[in-house]
Image (cartoon, rainbow, N blue to C red):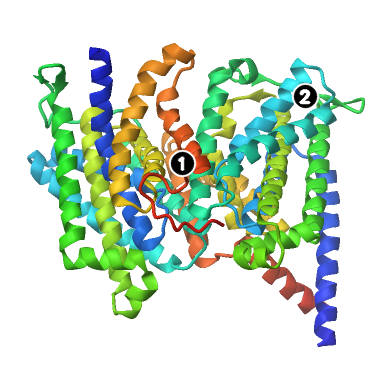
């Protein structure tokens, strides 16, 4: 028994060491990558951050959202407006953008906080439709259908025009987000998330304030989305509203479900999956000499199929497979 | 006044198609507790199949229509058996995601086979206007409206008077009780999917007759959400009436609000404001059961 728990502890320590090595490795590697590789890495890291936020809400608190791309959009355009139009420094703009996204998220989360899953699906879907419509209309903010330019900021006196330098800012936020995620789950509120997800009635009887818990989950989750959106806007430099469409919201939801609900590793693995699968399929299609016109629907179809296959055969997501694999390897080596 | 009546009638006709699709949605939800995000794609694929059958084989419309319904039945059975039956008891979000995945696959099949261009639907119903005294209405609208009405009456009778209709109502009122009394749940689930696919197919064909056929037709699938919530999510009557209300609302707000507010594209968005509003004030909708789990 003791041996088992010792082993478990060493697996955990191994995971933590692995995470540190991963972050350092990615940080160093990012400085030497080619332009297109760096672009992929940046998008993966930003989606991982947004995925953590959605995973807190969906995986940990059990509340679904089909509007996280729209909340990212709120963050993106808020940060752009604050930084470019109003001249607010970059770091406060990012945090304010997260705050604004959280406020909007609460607005749409509120009506469904007293209701069960299906209503939340509907409410968040409406949020996506309404917010996207707002992006189309608010030309002063988003440039409407033409999109808008967002200049990359100077952070603490460092010019981030260079993609590899900008990536370090993105990575820093992703690491902060990951550390906050892992620690939040160990707090009273984090435990309350799990209690509400497993059985809301029992949680309430045991003294968990349902309303406050769900509100917190929504606020924190949409704050993550807002920050990720702000980082996305600066990464893209030219921001089209399509970057925050319904399809992206669906991708984010697929990210957390395929990656692994309620786990940090799930958000990261899911982001890898969401960004790299289309790339790999494109590469494959090129190898097979397919016409470019046919590629898009094939890619989408395979993506849809993969979602269904994952749900059927690995409902706990890639994080579960990953943990199985690493634990197995670790125990094998430590023997 | 003519403008108003035109919008109103257009709204009622589109609304009756919404009603029918909403019926399919509510049906699946009541019987299987699945929120079906693939409904719009089912509807789109139904319309494409019908068009293909009519154009390539030269069948008369009615034969093509029924061939489509047979195809929809098989498709629904396949989806139910291959995916959703295996996901019984999975969390809501996984099931939602599965139907989204199915929708994406169906959509890509349509894009691969038929492409994204607008295909005109062969003239099945005469388009000439029919003078109703106060206003002239295109005949295709009237046909669509009465076909929807007919289908809804047929399904109403099915639920009220047949053994399987009764069985389905039993399952939706209490799954556990029905199962312990020997109701074959699996068959009820399959039947719910079949009926839902059939009404989607009919809705798709009618919608394509009115507005032409592109993959964008799948938008109908989500445009019924407000109707479903307004009707109370678990009420078939509610879904039927709310479908028409939402159709009218959509057309009137599309026709008038633009000049009033200076904002464009409010037509399709207005119902979603209503949806949020309903969830704020009266989540049970107009006809929903009061005993909603307030958690």
**Chain to which the residue tagged by mark 2 belongs:** A
Quarter that holds the C terminus of chain A? bottom right
Whether B74 is drawn above or below A46: the answer is below
Query: Can you see residue B108?
Result: no
Query: Can you see residue A215?
Result: yes
**Chain to which the residue tagged by mark 1 belongs:** A
Q: Position of residue A295 (x, y in %)?
A: 45, 39
Q: Which mark is residue A289?
A: 1
Q: Position of residue B53 (x, y in %)?
A: 16, 43
Left or right, B1 with respect to A291, comes to left
Residue density around tag 2, few if under 14, some if 14–19, many if 20 or more, within 10 Å: many
Q: Residue at x 48, y 60 (%)?
A: A309
Whether B59 is drawn above or below A80: the answer is below
Quarter that holds the N terminus of chain A? bottom right
Of the residues tagged 1 and 2, which is closer to the observer?
A: 2
**Residue topped by disc 2:** A152
Q: Secondary structure at mark 1?
A: loop
The one of B211 and B116 positioned closer to us in this rendering = B211
Q: Position of residue B7 (x, y in %)?
A: 28, 21
Q: Residue furthest right?
A: A157
Residue density around tag 1, few if under 14, some if 14–19, many if 20 or more, within 10 Å: few
Whether A48 is drawn above or below B172: the answer is above
- Real-space Cα distance between discs 1 and 2? 38 Å
Q: Residue furthest left?
A: B60
Q: Residue at x 27, y 32 (%)?
A: B14
Q: Secondary structure at mark 2?
A: loop
Q: Residue at x 26, y 57 (%)?
A: B194
């Amino acid at each position: 028994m003791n041996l088992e728990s010792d082993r478990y502890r060493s697996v955990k320590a191994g995971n933590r060491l692995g995470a540190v090595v991963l972050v350092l490795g990615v940080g160093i590697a990012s400085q030497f990558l080619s332009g297109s590789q760096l672009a992929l890495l940046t998008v993966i890291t930003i989606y991982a951050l947004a995925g953590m936020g959605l995973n807190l809400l969906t995986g940990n608190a059990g509340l679904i959202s089909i509007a996280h791309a729209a909340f990212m959009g709120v963050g993106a355009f808020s940060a752009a407006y604050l930084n470019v139009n109003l001249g607010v420094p970059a770091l406060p703009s990012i945090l304010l953008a997260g705050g604004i996204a959280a406020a909007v998220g609460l607005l749409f989360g509120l009506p469904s906080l007293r209701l069960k899953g299906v209503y939340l699906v509907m409410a968040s879907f409406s949020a996506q439709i309404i917010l996207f419509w707002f992006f189309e209309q608010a030309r002063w903010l988003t440039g409407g259908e033409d999109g808008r330019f967002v200049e990359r900021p100077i952070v603490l006196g460092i010019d981030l025009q260079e993609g590899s330098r900008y990536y370090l800012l993105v990575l820093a936020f992703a690491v902060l987000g990951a550390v906050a995620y892992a620690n939040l789950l160990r707090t009273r509120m984090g435990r309350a998330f799990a209690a509400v997800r497993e059985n809301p009635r029992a949680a309430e009887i045991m003294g968990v304030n349902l309303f406050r818990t769900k509100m917190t989950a929504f606020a924190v989750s949409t704050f993550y989305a807002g920050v990720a959106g702000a980082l996305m806007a600066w990464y893209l430099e030219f921001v089209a509203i399509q970057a925050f469409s319904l399809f992206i919201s669906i991708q984010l939801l697929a990210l957390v479900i395929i990656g692994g609900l309620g786990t940090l590793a799930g958000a990261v693995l899911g982001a890898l999956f969401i960004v790299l699968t289309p790339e790999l399929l494109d590469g494959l299609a090129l190898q097979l000499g397919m016409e470019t016109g046919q590629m898009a629907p094939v890619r989408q179809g395979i993506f849809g199929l993969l979602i269904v296959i994952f749900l059927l055969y690995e409902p706990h997501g890639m994080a579960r497979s990953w943990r199985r694999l690493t634990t197995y390897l670790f125990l094998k080596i430590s023997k | 006044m003519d403008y108003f009546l035109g919008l109103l009638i257009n709204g009622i006709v589109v609304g009756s198609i919404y009603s029918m699709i909403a019926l399919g949605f509510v049906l699946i939800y009541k019987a299987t507790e699945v929120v079906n995000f693939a409904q719009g794609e089912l509807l789109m694929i139904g319309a494409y199949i019908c068009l293909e059958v009519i154009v390539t084989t030269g069948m008369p419309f009615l034969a093509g229509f029924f061939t489509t319904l047979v195809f929809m039945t098989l498709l629904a059975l396949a989806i139910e058996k291959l995916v959703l039956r295996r996901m019984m008891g999975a969390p809501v979000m996984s099931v939602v995601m599965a139907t989204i995945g199915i929708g994406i696959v169906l959509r890509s099949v349509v894009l691969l086979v038929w492409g994204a261009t607008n295909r005109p639907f062969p003239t099945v119903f005469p388009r000439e206007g029919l003078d109703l005294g106060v206003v002239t209405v295109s005949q295709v609208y009237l046909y669509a409206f009465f076909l929807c009405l007919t289908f809804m009456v047929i399904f109403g009778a099915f639920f009220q008077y047949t053994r399987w209709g009764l069985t389905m109502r039993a399952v939706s009122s209490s799954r556990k009780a029905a199962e312990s009394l020997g109701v074959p749940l699996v068959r009820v689930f399959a039947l719910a999917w079949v009926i839902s696919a059939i009404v989607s197919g009919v809705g798709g064909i009618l919608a394509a007759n009115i507005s032409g056929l592109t993959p964008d037709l799948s938008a109908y699938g989500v445009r019924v959400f407000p109707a479903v919530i307004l009707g109370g999510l678990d009420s078939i009557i509610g879904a039927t009436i709310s479908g028409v209300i939402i159709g009218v609302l959509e057309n009137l707000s599309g026709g008038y609000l633009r000049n009033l507010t200076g904002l464009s594209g409010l037509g399709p968005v207005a119902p979603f404001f209503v949806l949020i509003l309903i969830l704020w004030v009266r989540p049970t909708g107009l006809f929903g059961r009061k005993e909603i789990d307030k958690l």
